[in-house]
Image (tube, helix red, strand yellow):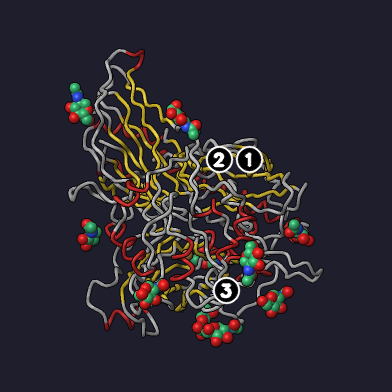
């Protein structure tokens, strides 16, 4: 009862705060102490372009407050958040808050040309939003390839006290429950990323000159730390997967490169077949030459508390990748996945999680029966284009060094190619993902509108389209002309048929069907800004129906999940692995937040290649943008 009252007051406070922010037309001048009103968190993020060596090799990159990755934004659910970004770099930038729904603040979503003007060198920008959600998120650059230059950091929003948690599905034991709750309340971020030695600008230039994508990285990092490991050619040959062997055969090439990559020639001859390419424009360090370097290893310290019955640790695994997808596991230890993209699920006990671009997995690890010692945390690329792996350490020690540690190695669950070490290894199963107490109900009724989107390579081998045509560069980049295009949030263009905008009415239900219009085609981790989506289903074969409801009549029962589908802010589309065998992936969302929302492939080279669209949600209830955002230069 007391809880209910407190909750009601909290929400009243929130509503009042929001009303006030509208009355004053300035989200930055909120009163902070209205009764039980939520707290307020202010962060300053200063961006600089400096020399740093995350994997032991120096390069110029982006630091946030002098560090990489940027600092964690720790927030309590319900907080009013103000993030002041200060651009001290020699180029324009913006910052996006990945997975944050931006309830009533679409102008703080951070997409240049879509929700704001660029933050120019020497300028600052105030991102103001309410933490309506809980869980793990991240912030990152949304300007050109700056994510690959290191502009990212974690966001952790601690859930409000009254929120129901899924931990009683793990245990019925009171003491264990207490230990789990304590571990979850103290969860720590573990960002996993791919990293390059060359600035993203170089990569973009080389891509254009060579006419091919460059899907080859130098290292994988945990929380911004790692090394460059160079494997012998014998080892690389010994762990090639069937897909990789098939690709080599198709390209008439005998082996992967010393960096563990598909050679540039194979990409030019197979992926860019029919387009003009120039391999002499690709310097040898891009695909071929591996130069080892020693950085530092990330160590997650966990102390065994003496006298405590149960020992648990919680990690927020955040996939801050620019391209690769990995298998993630901890040798010898299983993980309970209890939240995905910031929302609780019915926990799954697994040994391996497939983590792709932008994904978040909250995991609990039980150490009660584990010997103190070092447990390798591993990631290994499962992307066809590159074999690359890395490890960090979970160091489990006894308080005051009481107990001898176990020096024998715990069992490995994944190989360096991301494949399991045995058939009994359990992977996280997204199809079986069941939301726990979701914040918004799913609607199984036929959608109000269906958009069938044709994903393809178009124009040249590195240009991509989410629907038939690439997003023109001048939507998100400033054209040099003074009449550069207006920010879409500031002047929406409802119902234009340009293949890269979608228009909807508020409070309608929308189905998006992604079909591969060229085959073969890789999986695309499609990320939607604003609110989350549900995965209805996916399949192989042509998509020939006007709607999901029609398809459901024609396809076998069970093709779609209209009962309890998984909910996320990104879904990887089903890859089309064989020529001539297209695939489709259908998602649904509810229009609840009028505004301009970007939807795009999160692979940086695909995004830069134009694989993005703008959703103009709720054009009938379009928001009034505060003056200070409208006039920001
Ligand atoms: C930065 O943005 C401004 C306006 O938003 C534009 O005029 C300028 O050309 C951009 N600078 C660069 C380096 O792209
Ligand atoms: C590989 O070799 C075969 C047979 O010599 C040839 O038909 C095919 O075009 C070659 N493929 C490429 C990508 O060069
Ligand atoms: C290919 O790239 C090289 C190196 O950048 C350049 O010298 C050459 O002119 C290019 N060839 C063509 C046909 O563009
Ligand atoms: C990295 O460190 C190891 C162990 O100290 C050493 O054997 C190796 O030579 C170093 N490699 C480089 C590239 O510095
Ligand atoms: C040490 O750890 C290994 C692997 O986890 C395990 O098989 C072994 O039983 C442990 N030894 C002791 C003494 O606990
Ligand atoms: C994943 O879950 C689905 C739905 O419960 C099930 O049909 C499928 O067999 C599972 N996949 C694996 C690999 O266990
Ligand atoms: C943006 O580029 C497209 C061609 O890609 C052109 O049709 C359009 O007029 C341009 N818009 C502006 C505002 O420059
Ligand atoms: C949309 O895509 C279709 C199919 O590629 C193309 O024919 C049409 O010209 C495109 N429309 C626009 C406005 O670019
Ligand atoms: C997607 O592209 C097709 C052409 O291939 C076009 O007919 C359709 O209108 C486009 N959809 C959107 C939402 O732009
Ligand atoms: C849009 O629709 C949602 C869902 O019905 C509703 O909660 C919200 O208030 C609506 N927004 C506006 C501005 O009317
Ligand atoms: Cu993609």
Q: Nearer the viewer, mark 3 or mark 1?
A: 3
**Residue 570 image position (x, y, % from top left):** 44, 60
Q: Residue furthest right?
A: 482
- In this rendering, is residue 546 above or below 241? below
- Give SS at disc 3: loop
Report the Cα–Cα distance between label 3 and label 2.
31 Å
Of the 4 image quadrants, the one containing the C terminus is: bottom right
Q: Find out if the beta carbon at label 2 lies less than 8 Å from the nearest ligand 11 atom.
A: no
Residue topped by disc 3:
470
Q: In the rendered view, does 241 fall on the left or right side of 489?
A: left
Between disc 3 and disc 1, whose residue precedes? Answer: 1
Q: In the rendered view, does 554 fall on the left or right side of 24?
A: left
**Residue 99 image position (x, y, % from top left):** 50, 54
Other residues around mark 2 within 10 Å, as few (<14) / some (14–19) / many (≥20): many
Between disc 2 and disc 1, whose residue precedes? Answer: 1
- Give SS at disc 1: strand
Between disc 3 and disc 2, whose residue precedes? Answer: 2
Q: Mark 2 near mark 1, Cβ–Cβ under 8 Å?
A: yes
Dividing the image into four equal quarters, which quarter contains ligand 7?
bottom right
Q: In the rendered view, does 67 fall on the left or right side of 29?
A: left
Image point (64%, 61%), residue name: 205
Q: Nearer the viewer, residue 626 or 2?
A: 626
Residue topped by disc 1:
64
Numbered mark located on residue 69 in the image: 2
Q: Mark 3 near mark 2, Cβ–Cβ under 8 Å?
A: no
Other residues around mark 1 within 10 Å, as few (<14) / some (14–19) / many (≥20): many
**Residue 118 image position (x, y, % from top left):** 71, 57
């Amino acid at each position: 009862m007391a809880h209910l009252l407190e909750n009601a007051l909290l929400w009243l406070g929130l509503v009042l705060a929001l009303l006030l922010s509208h009355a004053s037309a300035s989200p930055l001048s909120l009163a902070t102490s209205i009764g039980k009103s939520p707290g307020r968190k202010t962060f300053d993020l200063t961006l600089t372009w400096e020399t740093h060596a995350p994997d032991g090799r120096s390069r110029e990159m982006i630091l946030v407050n002098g560090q990489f990755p940027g600092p964690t934004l720790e927030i309590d659910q319900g907080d009013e958040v103000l993030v002041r970004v200060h651009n001290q770099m020699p180029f324009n930038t913006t910052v996006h808050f990945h997975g944050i729904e931006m309830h009533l603040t679409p102008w703080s979503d951070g997409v240049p040309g879509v929700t704001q003007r660029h933050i120019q060198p020497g300028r600052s920008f105030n991102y103001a939003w309410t933490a309506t959600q809980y869980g793990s998120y991240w912030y990152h650059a949304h300007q050109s390839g700056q994510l690959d230059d290191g502009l990212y950091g974690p966001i952790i929003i601690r859930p409000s006290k009254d929120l129901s948690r899924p931990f009683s599905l793990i245990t019925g034991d009171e003491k264990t429950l207490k230990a789990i709750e304590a571990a979850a309340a103290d969860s720590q971020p573990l960002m996993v990323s791919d990293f390059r030695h060359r600035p993203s600008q170089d990569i973009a230039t080389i891509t254009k000159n060579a006419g091919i994508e460059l899907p080859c990285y130098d290292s994988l990092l945990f929380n911004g730390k790692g090394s460059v490991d160079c494997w012998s050619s014998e080892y690389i040959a010994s762990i090639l997967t069937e897909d990789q062997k098939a690709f080599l055969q198709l390209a008439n090439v005998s082996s992967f490169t010393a960096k563990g990559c598909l050679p540039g020639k194979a990409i030019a001859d197979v992926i860019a077949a029919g387009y003009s390419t120039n391999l002499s424009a690709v310097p040898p360090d891009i695909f071929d030459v591996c130069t080892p370097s020693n950085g530092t290893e990330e160590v997650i310290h966990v102390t065994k508390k003496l006298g405590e019955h149960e020992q648990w640790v919680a990690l927020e695994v955040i996939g801050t990748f620019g391209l690769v997808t990995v298998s993630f596991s901890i040798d010898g230890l299983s993980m309970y996945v209890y939240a995905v993209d910031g929302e609780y699920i019915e926990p799954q006990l697994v040994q391996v999680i497939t983590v792709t671009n932008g994904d978040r997995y909250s995991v609990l690890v039980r150490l009660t029966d584990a010997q103190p010692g070092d447990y390798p945390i591993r990631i290994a690329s499962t992307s066809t284009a590159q074999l690359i792996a890395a490890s960090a350490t979970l160091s489990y020690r006894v308080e005051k060094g009481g107990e001898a540690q176990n020096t024998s190695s715990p069992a490995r669950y994944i190989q360096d190619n991301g494949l399991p070490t045995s058939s009994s290894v359990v992977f996280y199963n997204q199809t079986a993902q069941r939301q726990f107490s979701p914040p918004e109900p799913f609607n199984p009724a036929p959608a109000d509108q269906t958009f069938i989107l044709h994903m393809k390579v178009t124009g040249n081998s590195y240009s991509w389209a989410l629907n038939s045509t690439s997003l023109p560069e001048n939507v998100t980049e400033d054209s040099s002309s003074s009449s550069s295009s207006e920010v879409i949030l500031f002047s929406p263009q409802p119902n234009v048929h340009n293949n890269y905008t979608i228009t909807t009415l508020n409070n309608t239900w929308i189905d998006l069907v992604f079909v591969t219009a060229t085959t073969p085609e890789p999986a695309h981790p499609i990320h939607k800004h604003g609110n989350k989506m549900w995965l209805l289903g996916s399949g192989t074969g042509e998509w020939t129906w006007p709607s999901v409801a029609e398809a459901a009549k024609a396809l076998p029962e069970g093709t779609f999940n209209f009962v309890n589908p998984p909910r996320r802010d990104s879904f990887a589309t089903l890859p089309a692995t064989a020529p001539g065998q297209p695939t489709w992936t259908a998602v649904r969302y509810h229009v609840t937040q009028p505004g301009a929302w970007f939807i795009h492939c999160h692979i940086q080279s695909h995004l830069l290649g134009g694989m993005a669209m703008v959703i103009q949600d709720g054009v009938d209830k379009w928001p009034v943008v505060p003056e200070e955002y409208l006039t920001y230069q």
